[in-house]
Image (tube, rainbow, N blue to C red):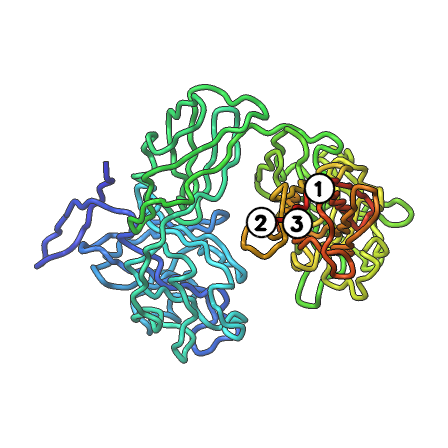
């Protein structure tokens, strides 16, 4: 049921009371000034502008503006007419803004953080009418983001489009309080909401995160949320103020470390776009990590000038682990740890076989050598790596921007032979993805096959060549292919140090090293495959060379 407010107005000397349904987005946050200094032409004070986009007048008495830590209450009757604007600012700044339009001064005006914040507009009944989560990137202008310029909404009828619907003001004063926004435009929105991930609040509550605000009424239907296992959803609760999160309550508890597949259907964003292909995610109840459940899997400690260090973890266990319970630190040569940094400030589930990356807030990682330590909240070491730039592939002359990748997740972390440079064809790094140099075990695995088993190189268009087909689980192997006759003599060196892709073929035309036709008979194709670590596997395949008369 929609909340009802009462509009109190004076018409022809009589007090008129009107009851009115109040909808989300009837009034929107239309312009904000998070950093007024240095002023371009407006008062040196923060402000928020509201716009009534409904067809009815709204009394703003007892409405609230909040940033989560402080809340301002409008304690005067103010009738905001349809398609009209009002400036909200501190009591002390109200007189300065009065020349620009209608103003309401409030006590405890929320501080608008320069770098970003969540601002909520809440009706007198406690309903969130509009909320924005802005950040300094919304300016898309390095000069104006330094202060003195407001952020303006382009399309007031598309209130939850986020960054796509906001720009730095182009007015010479630095903003347009009380006037139509200088960046006014129609902003189309046909993109469906995407399901990003889940995390677990408790054993019967799962939080589902989306990339944009949902229609909160539609999102309450429990029928929109299905699991691959017999889990019954009892309740769905969109979470204000942004409604990008829905908490679902289950009829029974999750089993620890059991992975559940969640699919969401028919939820819509606040523009009415229904969720599309990005509608599934894993869910589960996490548990604490033990040593080597997670391993350091890839590191970049010498980034290019425009890049940053990173550390990648791989979950090689069967556990579900919450990244927010993990910390990362460096260690000096005396064994002293730096101040540990949290991997994630908010819950973030790492499922078996997942990769997770930390970048931008890693501890100090020297370009030549260093020590990286992964810990849990109790200070227990989960994994530790003492790396050295000498572990890079020796033929790489410039290792700037080249990551070190773990070769085998099950081999010891500190074994230098278990690390090598990321492959060049993978861009010298695979953050968040399967390593380009990964090995599943110490034995090289692959398939070499011969077709046809009998070939006749007489140029009649039928079976004129022997095809040596190969397939490996990953590229960058090196191969030597030699043809032997029945007496064991090497008659043709078909390939020497050939670099192989994941799959392909080579061709033998029945000739020897001198280019002369060989006699009929059985031959052996010996394929030797090796990698940069010196591990080798050999394949022997027979083939019959025939002649047609």
Could you give the CA–CA distance between mark 1 and mark 3, rounded to whole angstroms? 10 Å
Q: Crowding at label 2, few (<14), some or many (≥20) Cα neighbours within 10 Å?
A: some
Q: Are marks 1 and 2 in contact (CB under 8 Å)?
A: no
On residue 358, the disc is 3
User: Looking at the image, which is closer to me, 104 or 221?
Assistant: 221
Q: Which residue is tagged 2? A: 463
In 3D space, how far apart are the residues under numbered discs 2 and 3 (Cα atoms)? 55 Å
- Indicate the secondary structure of the residue bearing disc 3: strand
Q: Residue furthest top?
A: 252
- Compare marks 1 and 3 and give the one earlier in the sequence: 1
Residue drawn at 44 percent across, 33 percent down: 262
Q: Secondary structure at mark 1?
A: strand
Q: Nearer the viewer, mark 1 or mark 2?
A: 2
Q: How much space separates mark 1 and mark 2, taking CA atoms?
A: 62 Å
Tag 2 secondary structure: loop
Residue displayed at 34% across by 34% down:
224
Quick one: 428 or 14, which is closer to the camera?
428
Mark 2 or 3 closer to N-term?
Answer: 3
| Position of residue 221 in the picture relative to residue 93 (left or right) | left
Q: Point out the residue furthest to the right here.
A: 334
| Residue where numbered disc 1 is placed | 327
Identify whether 454 is placed above or below 392. Answer: above
Tell me whether circle 2 and circle 3 mark residues in contact (CB < 8 Å).
no
Asked whether disc 1 touches disc 3, contact meaning CB atoms under 8 Å apart, the reply is no
């Amino acid at each position: 049921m929609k909340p009802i407010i009462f509009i109190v107005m004076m018409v022809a000397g009589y007090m008129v009371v009107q009851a009115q349904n109040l909808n989300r987005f009837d009034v929107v946050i239309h312009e904000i000034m998070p950093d007024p200094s240095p002023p371009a032409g407006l008062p040196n004070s923060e402000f928020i502008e509201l716009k009534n986009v409904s067809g009815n007048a709204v009394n703003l008495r007892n409405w609230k503006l909040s940033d989560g830590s402080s809340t301002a209450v409008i304690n005067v009757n103010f009738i905001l007419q349809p398609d009209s604007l009002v400036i909200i600012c501190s009591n002390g700044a109200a007189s300065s803004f009065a020349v620009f339009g209608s103003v309401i001064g409030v006590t405890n005006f929320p501080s608008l953080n320069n770098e970003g914040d969540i601002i909520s507009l809440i009706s007198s009944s406690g309903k969130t009418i509009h909320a924005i989560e802005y950040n300094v990137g919304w300016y898309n202008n390095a000069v104006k983001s330094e202060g003195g310029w407001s952020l303006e909404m382009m399309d007031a009828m598309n209130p939850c489009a986020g960054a796509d619907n906001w720009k730095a003001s182009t007015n010479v004063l630095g903003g347009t309080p009380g006037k139509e926004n200088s960046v006014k435009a129609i902003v189309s929105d046909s993109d469906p909401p995407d399901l990003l991930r889940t995390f677990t609040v408790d054993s019967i509550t799962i939080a589902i995160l989306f990339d944009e605000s949902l229609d909160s009424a539609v999102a309450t239907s429990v029928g929109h949320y299905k699991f691959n296992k017999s889990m019954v959803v009892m309740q769905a609760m969109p979470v204000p103020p942004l409604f990008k999160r829905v908490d679902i309550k289950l009829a029974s508890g999750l089993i620890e470390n059991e992975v559940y597949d969640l699919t969401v259907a028919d939820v819509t964003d606040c523009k009415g776009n229904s969720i599309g292909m990005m509608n599934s995610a894993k869910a589960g109840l996490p548990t604490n990590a033990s040593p080597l459940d997670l391993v350091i899997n890839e590191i970049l400690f010498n980034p290019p000038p425009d890049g940053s260090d990173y550390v990648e973890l791989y979950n090689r266990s069967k556990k579900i682990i919450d990244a927010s319970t993990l910390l990362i630190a460096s260690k000096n040569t005396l064994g002293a740890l730096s101040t540990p940094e949290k991997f994630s400030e908010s819950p973030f589930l790492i499922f078996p076989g997942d990769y997770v990356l930390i970048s931008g807030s890693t501890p100090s990682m020297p370009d030549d050598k260093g020590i990286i330590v992964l810990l849990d909240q109790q200070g227990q070491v989960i994994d530790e790596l003492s790396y050295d730039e000498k572990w890079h592939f020796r033929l790489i002359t410039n290792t700037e921007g080249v990551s070190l990748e773990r070769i085998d997740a099950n081999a010891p972390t500190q074994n230098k032979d278990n690390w090598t440079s990321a492959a060049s064809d993978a861009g010298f790094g695979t953050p968040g993805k399967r390593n380009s140099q990964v090995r599943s075990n110490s034995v090289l695995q692959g398939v070499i096959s011969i077709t046809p088993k009998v070939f006749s190189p007489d140029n009649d268009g039928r079976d004129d060549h022997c095809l040596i087909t190969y397939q490996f689980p990953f590229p960058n192997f090196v191969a030597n292919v030699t043809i032997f006759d029945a007496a064991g003599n090497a008659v043709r060196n078909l390939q020497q140090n050939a670099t192989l892709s994941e799959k392909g073929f080579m061709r033998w035309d029945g000739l020897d090293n001198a280019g002369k036709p060989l006699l009929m008979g059985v031959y052996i194709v010996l394929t030797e495959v090796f990698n940069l670590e010196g591990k080798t596997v050999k394949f022997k395949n027979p083939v019959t060379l025939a002649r047609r008369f």
